Image (tube, rainbow, N blue to C red):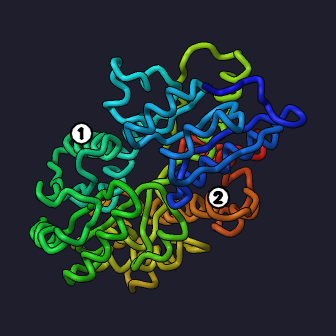
């Protein structure tokens, strides 16, 4: 059992953070935990990436005050419960949440709401690109992946379509993607085209892109690929760069640390839940075309997307495709159901979202760089399109 009397020199609390650093979601959570610790500590954070089974029983020796942990193995379940320290669990499985499981009594960071929003955002993203064939590639028998699949299928069904879902052959349901790669490529080739494929995370998205390359399937013209997590480095390294759903994991880490602090101090006496939020889709080349049969509209779209919508007018677009403004506007409305200017604004908003999440530019700088001009106009337009202000979308980190 943890010795709570041992808080550490100078009243510093020792917090064990059992999270790997290889995934962006975990790194973002650790950033949020660290931000809280610096503002409300003093805390001494012990980041434990591996060997959980050996490390957890030793935590009592060094006087651990609290735990934030992803608990993937049953033997770790038992060790964490035995530690009897205030604990916030990360992404409990459906089995771990069952009332008969002791872990169900822990406070936890939950992805359920995000998984529902991921399905909605993905279906709408593909629909905006006039895609009418949908597919999902996940990880079999993994709770969060199955939740994302269900949410995506429900949203696609509401649009009047079915979803093709890839399942590994039962005998090859292992973490290694390679043994069933040929089978997967055959499945991918057989899908109705053009198809929008939601991958359960960015790692699976990159594997999808590699499979498309090997199969000779052009991305995004025939296969539009969308990942989840928005690991910016790996998404940009993908070929082509991978569009992805961004999750506000840093804020979730901050709130998890805040909850843990309440548990340690006795201010929180019952288990509570922190919900991870889906922030929106960061569009890159893997979905950055609209699948339309009208060659002139397609050419106009390529021009707008290539120019990022920055400093473009409707006349610029019409001139680029050698059409009259009125004629192109008519065909835009018929094919896409929106105007040329609305498309320019959509592209500008996508670029703004990327800059807000991936750069340190101020809101005023983003407004200028994306062609919106004044901060006030940009903020009003962004809120109308996204449902929150640019600062709120970024996470309001400066205000915490």
Of residues 197 and 161, the one drawn nearer to the viewer in this rendering: 197
| Front residue of 280 and 51 | 51
Looking at the image, the residue that sits furthest to the top is 269
**Considering the numbered disc 2 on the image, is that residue within a helix, a strand or a loop?**
helix
Q: Residues within 10 Å of mark 1 (few under 14, many from 20)?
A: some
**Residue 212 in the image: x percent, y percent?**
25, 76
Residue plotted at (23% across, 72% down): 178
Q: Nearer the viewer, residue 277 or 287?
A: 277
First in sequence, mark 2 or 1: give its number.
1
Q: Nearer the viewer, residue 107 or 114?
A: 107
SS label for mark 1: helix
Q: Position of 241 compared to 191: left or right?
A: right
For residue 10, what is the image quadrant?
top right
Mark 2 surroundings: few (<14), some (14-19) or many (≥20) residues within 10 A: many
Compute the Cα span from label 2 to label 1.
30 Å
Q: Is residue 360 visible?
A: yes
* Label drawn at residue 154: 1
Q: Is residue 255 visible?
A: no
**Residue at (65% x, 67% y) in the render:** 371
Across and down, in percent, residue 129 comes to 32, 62
- As drawn, 187 above or below 163: below
| Quadrant of the frame with the N terminus | top right
Quadrant of the image for the C terminus? Answer: top right
* In the depicted structure, whether residue 295 falls above or below residue 169: below
Is the residue under label 1 in contact with that under label 2 (CB below 8 Å)?
Answer: no
Q: Which mark is residue 356?
A: 2
**Drawn side of residue 384 relative to residue 14, left or right:** left
Give the vertical position of 378 relative to 396 (above or below).
below
Q: Residue furthest right?
A: 10
């Amino acid at each position: 059992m943890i010795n709570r009397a041992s808080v550490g020199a100078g009243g510093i609390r020792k917090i064990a953070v059992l999270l790997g650093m290889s995934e962006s979601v975990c790194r973002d959570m650790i950033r949020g935990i660290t931000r809280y610790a610096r503002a409300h500590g003093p805390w001494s954070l012990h980041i434990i990436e591996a060997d959980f089974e050996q490390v957890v029983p030793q935590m009592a020796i060094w006087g651990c005050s609290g735990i934030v942990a992803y608990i993937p193995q049953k033997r770790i379940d038992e060790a964490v419960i035995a530690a009897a320290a205030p604990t916030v669990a990360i992404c409990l499985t459906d089995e771990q949440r069952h009332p008969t499981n002791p872990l169900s009594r822990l406070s936890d960071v939950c992805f359920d709401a995000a998984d529902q929003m991921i399905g909605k955002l993905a279906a709408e993203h593909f629909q905006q690109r006039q895609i009418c064939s949908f597919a999902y590639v996940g990880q079999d028998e993994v709770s969060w992946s199955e939740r994302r699949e269900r949410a995506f299928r429900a949203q696609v069904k509401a649009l009047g379509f079915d979803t093709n879902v890839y399942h590994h052959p039962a005998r090859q349901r292992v973490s290694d993607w390679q043994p069933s790669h040929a089978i997967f490529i055959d499945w991918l080739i057989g899908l109705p085209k053009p198809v929008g494929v939601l991958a359960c995370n960015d790692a699976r998205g990159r594997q999808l892109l590699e499979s498309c390359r090997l199969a000779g399937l052009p991305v995004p013209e025939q296969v539009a690929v969308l990942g989840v997590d928005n690991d910016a480095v790996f998404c940009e390294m993908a070929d082509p760069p991978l569009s992805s759903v961004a999750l506000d994991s840093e804020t979730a880490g901050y709130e998890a640390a805040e909850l843990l602090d309440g548990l340690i101090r006795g201010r929180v006496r019952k288990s509570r839940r922190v919900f991870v939020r889906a922030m929106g889709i960061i569009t890159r080349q893997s979905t950055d075309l609209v699948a339309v049969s009208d060659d002139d509209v397609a050419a106009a779209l390529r021009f707008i997307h290539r120019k990022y919508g920055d400093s473009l007018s409707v006349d610029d677009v019409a001139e680029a495709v050698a059409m009259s403004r009125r004629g192109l506007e008519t065909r835009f409305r018929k094919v896409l159901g929106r105007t040329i200017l609305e498309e320019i604004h959509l592209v500008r908003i996508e670029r703004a979202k990327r800059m807000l999440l991936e750069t340190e530019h101020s809101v005023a700088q983003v407004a200028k760089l994306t062609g919106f001009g004044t901060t006030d106009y940009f903020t009003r337009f962004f809120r109308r399109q996204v449902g929150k202000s640019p600062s709120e979308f970024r996470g309001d980190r400066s205000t915490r």
